[in-house]
Image (spheres, rainbow, N blue to C red):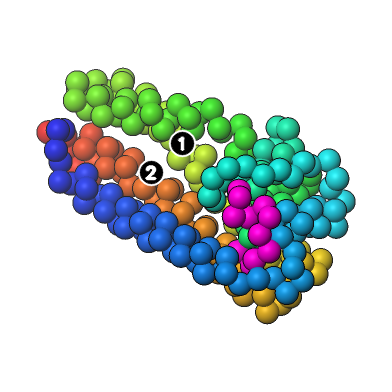
Amino acid sequence: MVFDPMYFLFLAPALLLSVWASFKTKSTFKKYSKVRTMNGMTGAQAAKAMLEQAGIRDVEIKPVPGRLSDHYNPVNKTLALSEPVYSIASIAAVGVACHEAGHAVQHATAYKPMWIRSILVKPASLGSTLGFYGMMFGLFLSSTGLFMAGVLLFCGLLAFQMVTLPVEFDASNRAKKLAVEYGIVSAQERQGMDKVLNAAALTYVAAAAASIMQLLYFLMRAGLLGGSRD
């Protein structure tokens, strides 16, 4: 268990996808950060316009430090936009801002997967650490109870990541559709916006893939998935 080449063999595809997704997201955002919106609308203005058109007026839009640290907090109804998004009038900024506004629209319309994801936040937090170590030490100590406890905890993380996929894809789809419908971007500008959001979506797919492969590896090592425990 100190060094198992099979572990890296299992994780290699997901790790490569993760590296590619990260590169694609950053490079695409950088490219379209240089493309100014025709109407001169910044990320903050785009998010505000989308929310107002959707009839949502109780969400605070505020700037936060960092790069690609944008997020929507349903607890206090705050839409936080990073510095390269909040005050920049670019296709990339508007795309990201509208995506986050899409989460606010999900919240306002009681989108079920978003509600389920909120419930899974704490189990996911435990599963990301205790689950992994529970499986690892369960194998090392030949403790079936500890191993299965780790599996259950890790499944909490995996469940969160799987529910996150439709939540993120739906937010992007809402952003793409409503941005054009509300006149925030033109149909032509939406092509660049689509590329930015599609690249970002890959990061969530990569994260879920990595967790799935980790779980499959441990189940295989435990002899529960066509492998033999040694």
x then y, percent, for residue 172: 63, 59
User: Which segment did they paint magenta?
Assistant: 82-92
Residue identifier under label 1: 157
Quadrant of the snapshot with the N terminus? top left
Q: Which of the labelled discs sits on residue 82, or is there none?
A: none
| Residue 175 visible in the current orientation | no
Please report contact status of discs 2 and 1: CB closer than 8 Å, yes or no: yes
Q: Answer above or below: position of 107 versus 16.
A: above
| Left or right: residue 68 compared with residue 215 | right
x then y, percent, for residue 138: 25, 24
x then y, percent, for residue 125: 48, 30
Residue identifier under label 2: 211
Q: Quadrant of residue 169?
A: bottom right
Element marked by disc 1: helix
Real-space CA distance between mark 2 and mark 1, rounded to the nearest whole angstrom: 8 Å
Q: Residue extending furthest bottom?
A: 188
The kind of residue on which mark 1 rests is Leu
The kind of residue on which mark 2 rests is Ser
